[in-house]
Image (spheres, helix red, strand yellow):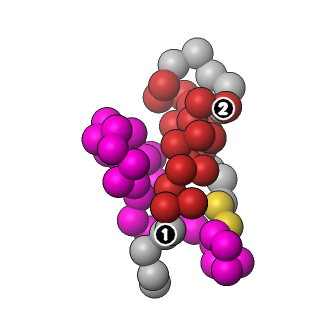
Amino acid sequence: MRNPTEYVKMRVLAAIDMAGGRTITERIRQVSALTFEDEEGRRHRFTFRTIDAARQRGDGEAPKG
């Protein structure tokens, strides 16, 4: 599987901001249930741990697979 593009990474991080939930943990859990599609139509899903680690890095270096 190829690594997700920057576009997908940014969509995941933006989805956290848009997700409902009172805490960041609740928001990330909701986002981890979503599937994101890249520019070429490939689908990507990310685990809670992957999204949380990317968010904590805060540098846009986001989820790998």
Up/down of 7 relative to 38, above or below: above
Up/down of 37 relative to 41, above or below: above
Q: Position of residue 60 (x, y in %)?
A: 39, 48
Span colored in magenta: 38-65
Q: Disc 2 residue type?
A: Ala
Instruction: Tell me the residue that label 2 is attached to.
Output: 19
Question: Of label 1 and label 2, which has the lower sequence position?
Answer: 1
Instruction: Tell me the residue that label 1 is attached to.
Output: 4
Residue 62 on the magenta span: yes
Q: Disc 1 residue type?
A: Pro
Q: Report whether residue 57 is seen.
A: yes
Which residue, as the protein is rendered here, is positioned at the far top? Answer: 22
Quick one: quadrant of the C terminus? bottom left
Q: How many numbered marks appear?
A: 2
Res 62 label? none
Which residue, as the protein is rendered here, is positioned at the far bottom? Answer: 1
**Residue located at (57% from left, 36% from top):** 16
Q: Of helix, strand and loop, which one carries label 1?
A: loop
Residue 28 on the magenta span: no
